[in-house]
Amino acid sequence: MNHNIVILGSQWGDEGKGKVVDFLTDKADAVVRFQGGHNAGHTLVINGEVTKLRLIPSGILHEGVKSFIGNGVVVSLEALHAEMDELLARNVPVFERLRISEACPLVLPVHVALDEAREAALGEHKIGTTKRGIGPAYEDKIARRAIRIGDLAHPEKLKAKLTNLLDLHNFTLQNYYKVDVHFDLEETYASLLHYAKTILPMITDVSAELNAIRVNKGKIIFEGAQGTLLDIDHGTYPFVTSSNTISGTVASGAGFGPCYIDAVIGITKAYSTRVGSGAYPTELFDEIGEHLGVKGCEFGTVTGRKRRTGWLDLVALRRAIEINSITSICLTKLDVLDGLTEIKVCVAYELDGKEVSYPPYDNADYLRCKPIYKTLKGWSEETFKQTDYNKLPQAARDYVRFVEQTLNVPIDIISTGPERNQNVIVKNIF
């Protein structure tokens, strides 16, 4: 039996993690975010009602389930408050269900300004960040100068740290980026003290609470943000996010030992999408790419940006399986492929005249990779809303089986629509 499972994206993000976490939370005692910030959006559709979450774990809608924000997450108090207010307006008891690590670094307005200034300075070579200050906040963490949530409990210490931080960043904005902006110390300090009144009662030792649940044989879901191919170390650097998005980050980002993890579920679209710049060998620029984007509603939850679309890439997916030790796959948006006469799957790359089965780490090399495709038969019947594997079209089952056999990893869940219960359950995860 699995008690502690990691659910993460195996591609470039936007795979449908939120829906799967929400669906599986019925059997969980706790759901944990362990990395990223409010640059990641998870969309839930329950009985036609849409909920968009950015910082708060997707388990927040479930009674009797604890939601945790681990120390590996960078937190914008403004964004967190806005998200809490949205949930409170719908009578979701956020204060009862949500707890936050005191070690979470804060994303401040000055970080947003730095993010915007850097992207503007890069021009056509910009990374394609969400401009929400995530990268600069992580930089402060690594430089050991971050303001952390626990600092809110010590006003004098907070003000001293904030003084040094704003002095540095104001100088950088004005003298390096030549941006006519200045963040006032007293104004920023007062804002933090205002948020502290709400946030401080919610802080806890997340690691200790999670391990107490583990000892008592409870079930925990660790919810990843973004996707494996955006990992700061293993993604298409430099066109990546600012955190480690892989399963190993659970240990550092939530204080939960790696040997306690029982299963890692890789959420994988039946095709692929990407937001922002960077290599993308299977990207489509034709009517099929448009079909995937329109039918799949491929627009960012947080930014609303149109996503790039392409065929499923098993080369990149193989890397994700290995570095995450993915034990099974949840294949999402199978229904988006309904109606296509043929479906292509990338099984290898051609790089400088040679066939390669692993993606290169360097983005410049990745850009030169050409996909080698296997063409499979499509299907005209609908898979939308289907919950019985045996009632899926034969060609759809052949597609699923091909992916399983090529990757040697089982597909235990197939998502056939955005609603919580629109799934084919091949094998129970818990």
Image (cartoon, grey):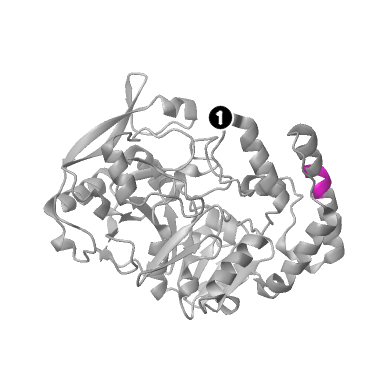
- Residue 424: percent from the left, percent from the top? 25, 64
- Residue 329: percent from the left, percent from the top? 33, 55
Residue 311 visible in the current orientation: no
Q: Residue at x 69, y 48 (%)?
A: 111
Q: Quadrant of the N terminus?
A: bottom left
Judge whether 233 appears above or below 388 on screen.
above
Judge whether 68 appears above or below 235 on screen.
below
Q: Quadrant of the C terminus?
A: bottom left
Q: Which residue is mark 1?
A: 125
Main structural element of the magenta stretch: helix, strand or loop?
helix
In the picture as drawn, the residue positioned furthest to the front comes out as: 180
Which quadrant would residue 83 be assigned to in this image?
bottom right
- Residue 179: percent from the left, percent from the top? 74, 37
Left or right relative to 241: residue 419: left
- The foreground one among 95 and 30 is 95
Left or right relative to 294: residue 137: right
- What kind of residue is marked 1? His
- Residue 2: percent from the left, percent from the top? 39, 67
- The foreground one among 8 and 51 is 51
Residue 266 visible in the current orientation: yes
- The foreground one among 27 and 410 is 27
Q: Is residue 353 magenta?
A: no
Report the span colored magenta.
165-169
* Disc 1: CA contacts within 10 A as few (<14), some (14-19) or many (>=20): few
Left or right relative to 388: residue 167: right
Total label count?
Answer: 1
In the picture as drawn, the residue positioned furthest to the top comes out as: 353
